[in-house]
Image (spheres, rainbow, N blue to C red):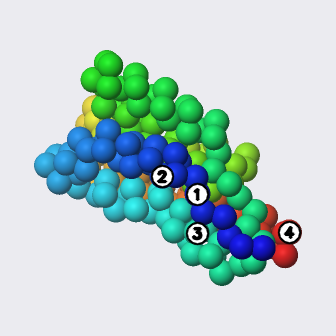
Amino acid sequence: MKIKALPSITLAILVFSLVNSHHLFRSWFNTPIENFSGLIFFLWILPLPVFWFCKSKQENPWTTANTFLSWLYLLFGLISIVTSLNAIAYVGLAFACSTLIPWLPVNYFWLIASISWMPAFGWYLTHQFPQVPIISLSIFRIILAVSGSLLVLYKLTMVKKSYE
């Protein structure tokens, strides 16, 4: 069997989510609290390129885009545009990214771990724990992102092995 490409609507939704979240990328470089958030986002999103690289090498494709999450992103994206709340756009970006891997129950934890790269979470941590150094809070956020990614990668490899 040939590997199926993602539907163009899924790619369009992902591009729209990235454009809608452009404030996120700017805040990573301009806010001291968010210095490590670009790295944290990369660590959180790591299951996507790993999965697609492994998928391109196999003959039996076992995933398609999750259309429910695509529609959920569109809802969050439209609400964020209407209300001008960037945090909603970032949650939508997490949903849009999660459409690119097969849906497993462990993905709930991965989606929850997405708060690790969101500026609102950095703000919350620094205001709830003002006595803790920012570097310690950043390490906590890195651990949260890595644990979510590793859990998803582990489950994806287990599902992949069951199809072989």
* Mark found first going from the N terminus, 4 or 3: 3
Looking at the picture, which amino acid does disc 2 mark?
A: Leu
Secondary structure of the residue carrying tag 3 is helix
Looking at the picture, which amino acid does disc 3 mark?
A: Trp
Distance between the alpha carbons at the discs numbered 1 and 4: 22 Å
Secondary structure of the residue carrying tag 4 is helix
Looking at the picture, which amino acid does disc 4 mark?
A: Ser
Residue 124, picture quadrant:
top left
* Mark found first going from the N terminus, 1 or 4: 1
Distance between the alpha carbons at the discs numbered 2 and 3: 14 Å
Q: Residues within 10 Å of mark 3 (few under 14, many from 20)?
A: few
Q: Is residue 35 left or right of residue 83?
A: left
Disc 1: which residue: 6
Q: Nearer the viewer, residue 160 or 71?
A: 71
Disc 3: which residue: 52
* Mark found first going from the N terminus, 2 or 1: 1
